[in-house]
Image (tube, rainbow, N blue to C red):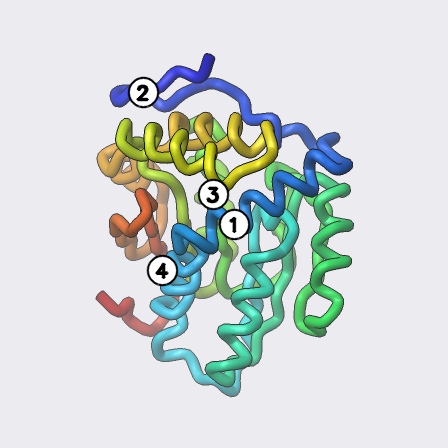
Amino acid sequence: MIQFSPKYRSKQVEILDSFELKGPEMEQMLIDLKIVNKLLGGQQVTINGVEKLLKGISKNESITIVDIGCGDGEMLRNIARFGANNNYNFNLIGVDGNEHIIKIAQSRSTAFQNIKFETKNIFSEGPIVPHYHIALCTLFLHHFKNEDITTILEKLSSQAKVGVVVNDLHRSRIAFWLFKLFSRIFIKSKIAKHDGLVSVARGFKRKELETLAETIAMGTSKIHWKWAFRWQWIVRNKNYKTGMRK
C-alpha cells in the first residue's frame, strides 16, 4: 500500500526507476504520462520557465538545452515547437539512464532535426554534455533522496551557462486523492497508477525546496506554485549577465 505523509517525503520506489523497464508496459506508461501532462498542463510549467531564462538572449544565438531524465522525449518535442514558433535556434539533447526509453525517444523524434538523445547516468563523472545553456529537470528530482538532489543541482547549476528549470510535484494530500480519482478514469497502465501516487508522496513542500536551495551554491533562485500541484523552480547562473523576469 502506498503511504502518504504531509511531514516527510516518501522513500517508496517507483517502478520507472529501473533502467531495465521495457516492453509494452513501459510504452503504455509513456502514453499515460503524456495524457496526464496534456490534461493537467504540466509541460507548460517547464516551457514557461525556459521563456523566463531566455529573456535578454539574442535569437541569433544557438542555445543548447539539456533535458535530464527525458523519458520518451515529449518535453523536448514541445520545446522544439516552441522554439520554431518563436524563432529561437535550439540545439536539444535528451539524457536518460534507460536505454530502452532512449530508443523510443529517438523513434518518436525523427521529424525533429535539432533533437538528439544520449543514454547516461546523471551521477557519471564529467559534464552531462559539453557547453550547454539550460538544463531541464521535469518530474525528475522527486525520484531522489535530498542529498542526491543537492549533488544533481550543484552539478547542473555549475555547468549550465544560463540556468536550470525544475518542474516537480507539490506533495499534497489533496493532490494524492485527486490523482487516485484521475487515474481511474484516464490511466490504463498499473505502472503509471502506482508510480503516479508514489511520485506525489515523494514530492516537495515549499519549505523543503527552499532548504535545498540554501544548501546549494547557486545563483538567483525563484520558486513558484503552478497548477496542477506543481513547483516551478528557476535557477539563473550567478555569472550570467541578464536579469530574471519576475
Going from N to C along the chain, the mark reached first, 3 or 1, is 1
Seen in the picture, residue 75 relative to 245 is either above or below; the reply is: above
Classify mark 1: helix, strand or loop.
Answer: helix
Mark 4–mark 2 distance (CA, rounded to whole Å): 28 Å
From the viewer's side, name the closer residue of 10 and 207. Answer: 10
Identified at 49% across, 41% down, the residue is: 186
Answer whether labels 3 and 2 touch (C-beta < 8 Å): no
Q: Position of residue 187 (x, y in %)?
A: 53, 38
Mark 3–mark 1 distance (CA, rounded to whole Å): 15 Å
Q: Is residue 114 left or right of residue 216?
A: right
Q: Position of residue 48 (x, y in %)?
A: 37, 64
Going from N to C along the chain, the mark reached first, 4 or 3, is 3
Answer whether labels 4 and 2 touch (C-beta < 8 Å): no
Mark 1–mark 2 distance (CA, rounded to whole Å): 28 Å
Single out the residue that lies furthest toward the top.
1
From the viewer's side, name the closer residue of 74 and 99. Answer: 74
Residue 230 lies in what quarter of the image?
Answer: top left
> Foreground mark, 4 or 1?
1
User: Can you identify the residue that label 4 sits on?
Assistant: 236
Going from N to C along the chain, the mark reached first, 1 or 2, is 2
Residue type of the residue flagged with mark 2: Tyr
User: Can you identify the residue that label 2 sits on?
Assistant: 8
Numbered circle sitting on residue 35: 1
From the viewer's side, name the closer residue of 173 and 105. Answer: 173
Mark 4–mark 3 distance (CA, rounded to whole Å): 19 Å
User: Can you identify the residue that label 3 sits on?
Assistant: 139
Residue 25 lies in what quarter of the image?
Answer: top right
Answer whether labels 4 and 3 touch (C-beta < 8 Å): no
Identified at 26% across, 69% down, the residue is: 245
> Foreground mark, 4 or 2?
2
Q: Is residue 18 left or right of residue 55?
A: right
Identified at 76% across, 42% down, the residue is: 100
